[in-house]
Image (cartoon, rainbow, N blue to C red):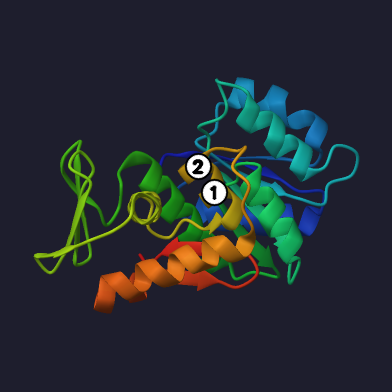
Amino acid sequence: MAKDKILVVDDEEDILDLVEYNLKQNGYKVSCISTGEEVLETVHSYKPDLILLDLMLPGVDGFDVCKDLKSQPETKDIPVIMLTAKSEDIDVVTGLELGADDYITKPFSPRVLVARVRAILRKKNKSSGIEKTSDKIIRVQDILIDTRKHTVQVNDQPIDLTFSEFRLLQLLAERPGWVFSRYQIVDALRGEDYPVTERSVDVQVVGLRKKLGSAGKYIQTVRGVGYRFKE
């Protein structure tokens, strides 16, 4: 049974009860709070392995909470899964750009919730689906990435990528299933001051998929949000 500790932050009592019950049924330790003001103090005392964070909190909302968590060295590595209302794409993008690791839309299936929690914790503790034969080589699906030599092979065939395409592939492949917004991708590739539009990121993805051939299908579009590498 799992022993990880989960902090759930939501101002709806029914949601807290539902989430707490299902996580405990799956072996997780759970602590629930209902306001953003309580988060930082609770995090320091409870030391959760993962935080489920509602975005639409009264007072200090989930965006500010996430920003604070990700700006502090002692809390920045705690995975955050956002709970958000369905179809609020702009909220999802904003949350991801502030450092959240994943999102779940309301209403949600308890099974899906537990599966997403388990997946994030698995990735935190051990890169699921990735074989790192050294700290320089990543093997995922049909793709072999040598980060030292900046080379890529698909089914043992070399693929010629530009620097940006290589870094984009590395970013996505290192975290299968994680959703990256377009601006997160830009920041990772070029730095925050690099002038770019969403369209230019889309063009990079199209070019990368084409060069990867059959393996291009592993780079998935998350409508209204960005891209992820298929788990």
> In terms of secondary structure, where does tag 2 sit?
helix
Q: Residue 65: image x %, image y %?
A: 74, 36
Q: Which amino acid, mark 1? A: Val
Q: Residue 54: image x %, image y %?
A: 73, 50
- Does residue 184 lie above or below 92 as drawn? above
Check if mark 1's residue and mark 2's residue have beta carbons within 8 Å. Answer: yes
Q: Say left or right for 94 vs 117.
A: right
Q: Residue, x 58% and y 57% (percent of image)?
A: 182
Q: In which quarter of the image is the C terminus?
A: bottom left
Residue 146 — which label? none
Label 2 crowd (10 A; few <14 / some 14-19 / many >=20):
few
Q: Which residue lies furthest to the left in this view?
A: 156
Q: Residue 121: image x %, image y %?
A: 42, 46
Q: Residue, x 50% and y 68% (percent of image)?
A: 203
> In terms of secondary structure, where does tag 1 sit?
helix
Q: Residue 72: image x %, image y %?
A: 62, 22
Q: Say left or right for 114 vs 132.
A: right
| Residue bearing the label numbered 1 | 186
Q: Residue 184 versus residue 196: which sits nearer the camera? A: 196
| Residue bearing the label numbered 2 | 190
Label 1 crowd (10 A; few <14 / some 14-19 / many >=20):
many
Is residue 55 visible to us here? Answer: yes
Q: Residue, x 17% and y 42% (percent of image)?
A: 149
Q: Say left or right for 96 vs 88.
A: left
